[in-house]
Amino acid sequence: DAKTTQPPSMDCAEGRAANLPCNHSTISGNEYVYWYRQIHSQGPQYIIHGLKNNETNEMASLIITEDRKSSTLILPHATLRDTAVYYCIVRSRGGTSYGKLTFGQGTILTVHP
Amino acid sequence: DGGITQSPKYLFRKEGQNVTLSCEQNLNHDAMYWYRQDPGQGLRLIYYSQIVNDFQKGDIAEGYSVSREKKESFPLTVTSAQKNPTAFYLCASSPPGEAYEQYFGPGTRLTVT
């Protein structure tokens, strides 16, 4: 699985867009980019995933560069409840994969009033 | 609302006692997972089940047991053989073909003294 690199922390003002970057320069063609977050003392929450096209759902947008070596998770209007640790992981689907999730250090996003 | 429920949220036990943590989902997912998270640490996979009546050990299965008699339920028993059972236990499930799109329950915080 490709290694990912994320900044350790970021700040964002409430109501503004939060743009969280992730580098995955060794990603292979069949690997997807997944984003999760974990709010303190809660279980992780799946946010979004994508292969090469940009993706959007009710929570966020995922922008993947054309060479797929990096991606950005966008929370369009951050709220205080979006304060959490955000994790970017890269995994290939299918085959004998059984879905073991392992998170790196992630990015601590702090949303300020 | 579809989701995963875990009960209880907090559980206290004396050393030497077995304890069973409940996990129920109504998402109609085939695959279910149990993770353990220690303070400031990442997730570690205990057991997973890809289908009813089948389950496999994860990375830290020693001292734990599971059953999968129904699609909706995947209880975890922490036995007295588990050396350090005090931890935050998380149950998750994933839809078919999406092993890394996992939906987590709120977790059970187990304290053994």
Image: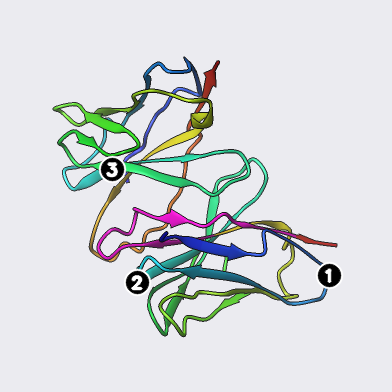
In this view, B109 is above or below A82: below
Residue under label 2: B30
Quadrant housing residue B70: bottom left
Residue under label 1: B15
Task: Pinpoint residue B54: horizontal percent, then vertical percent.
Answer: 41, 81
Q: From the image, state whether disc 2 or disc 1 is nearer to you.
A: 2
Task: Pinpoint residue A26: horizontal percent, then vertical percent.
Answer: 26, 35
Task: Pinpoint residue B78: horizontal percent, then vertical percent.
Answer: 67, 72
The numbered mark, 2 or 1, whose residue comes first in the sequence reads 1
Magenta-drawn stretch contains B97: yes
Q: Are marks 3 and 2 in contact (CB under 8 Å)?
A: no
Q: Which residues are magenta?
A: B91-110
Q: Tell me the distance, in whole angstroms, between the alpha carbons under discs 3 and 1.
A: 41 Å
Instruction: Using the image as rendered, state which of residue A68 and residue B98 is in the foreground.
Output: B98
| The disc label shown at residue A46, or none | none
User: Can the viewer see residue B62 in this picture?
Assistant: no
Residue under label 3: A49
Q: Amino acid at mark 3?
A: His
Q: Amino acid at mark 1?
A: Glu
Q: Tell me the distance, in whole angstroms, between the alpha carbons under discs 2 and 1.
A: 34 Å
